[in-house]
Image: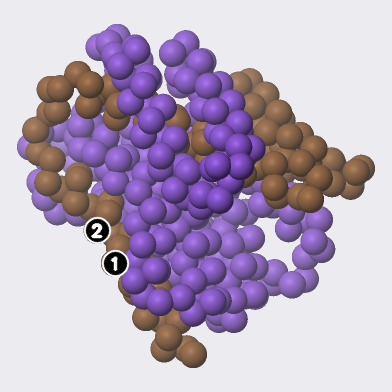
Amino acid sequence: MNTHVWSYIFVMAAVSYLIRVLPITLIRRQIKNRFIRSVLYYLPYVTLSVMTVPAIFSIHENPVCGAAGLVAGLITAWTTRNLFLTALGACLAVLAAALIV
Amino acid sequence: MKRETAANFIKGAKHGLPIGLGYFAVSFSLGITARNAGMTAFQGLMISLLNNASAGEYAGISAIRTQAPYLELVFLILITNARYFLMSCALSQRLAPGTPWYHRMLIGFDITDEIFGIGVTHPYPLPPAYMYGGFSTTIPMWALGTMFGVIAGNILPAVAVTALSAAIYGMFIAVVIPPARKDRVILILVAISFAVSGLVSLIPLFAGMSESLRIILLTLVISCAAALIRPVTEEQEGRA
């Protein structure tokens, strides 16, 4: 069982590394194509947004808890622009909601 | 030059510190999952040290628990980490063209959502030392959080685990919102992404699709649509 877990970990690590290292190592010139530049510019914001919704609604059996975390996170991020405070705000809102519902 | 490198490293380490704190909380709950899959504290430490990927590690740990075939494991990691491929493409555009290969191979080791966030928003050109500074305060926190999660996870009450699991979404939001304040197109794009992603998950046709596949498809479709409707301007690229 133990060696089994280790081989899983190493396979995961190899795939994770290759997927990250190949583009940054192989693409040496500035990409001139405006469409590709635009896709690359917008992509991270879209990915992180679609990873947040709807997943955040399923952290508790009552989706209100996730909604509270989302709203608190959005407000904290907008006002503080601070990563740690935003994570903290979302956690505290979920905690409060989970204790109430 | 040397002094500039040190200054960049320190700046990166400072910017990484709040990320590291958030990582610790998030990876602590990841450690709870690892413990439930029968993993040891050392395995928890190493899986995070070597992978540096929240969604990818969650998927991998579930594969370990169910002893999924290796091919399925590879496919899972490819899908859950596909966005890092695209982030790596984007980061390649932020490095000065002459940046040597060994810097690229080192930076590639730890392209996470948050490290990407601070890297891609750093004014061009992105100095490798800034990235290494960011690594120095985040990689150890991510790995140690997972280890302590395995050790202490069962002590925490369920409601605390639920609350902690919100940390990762708070981090996603914190990467997206500050640039959205500066660029209205990003703000609208984030709102549209939230709405479309939420609605799609309610449509029975897409409900059977795995979450990872949905993330990949929606990301590609929405990003391409945005690129066609609002091609990026030099002003935007310089600002965000």
Left or right: A101 in relation to A89: right
Q: Chain of mark 2?
A: A
Q: Could you tell me residue B111's position as x and y percent?
A: 34, 48
Residue B204 left/right relative to B2: right
SS under mark 1: helix
- B162 vs B230, nearest the viewer: B230
Residues under labels 1 and 2: Cα distance?
Answer: 6 Å
Please provide percent x and percent y for residue B61.
52, 69
The crowd level at tag 1 (other Cα within 10 Å; few <14, some 14-19, many 20+) is: some
Same-subunit check for callouts 1 and 2: yes
Q: Chain of mark 1?
A: A
Q: Is residue B152 above or below residue B213?
A: below
Chain B: drawing colour: purple
Q: Residue at x 84, y 46 (%)?
A: A98
Q: Which residue is mark 1?
A: A14
Of the numbered discs in the image, which one, if any, rests on residue A18? 2
Q: Which chain appears brown?
A: A
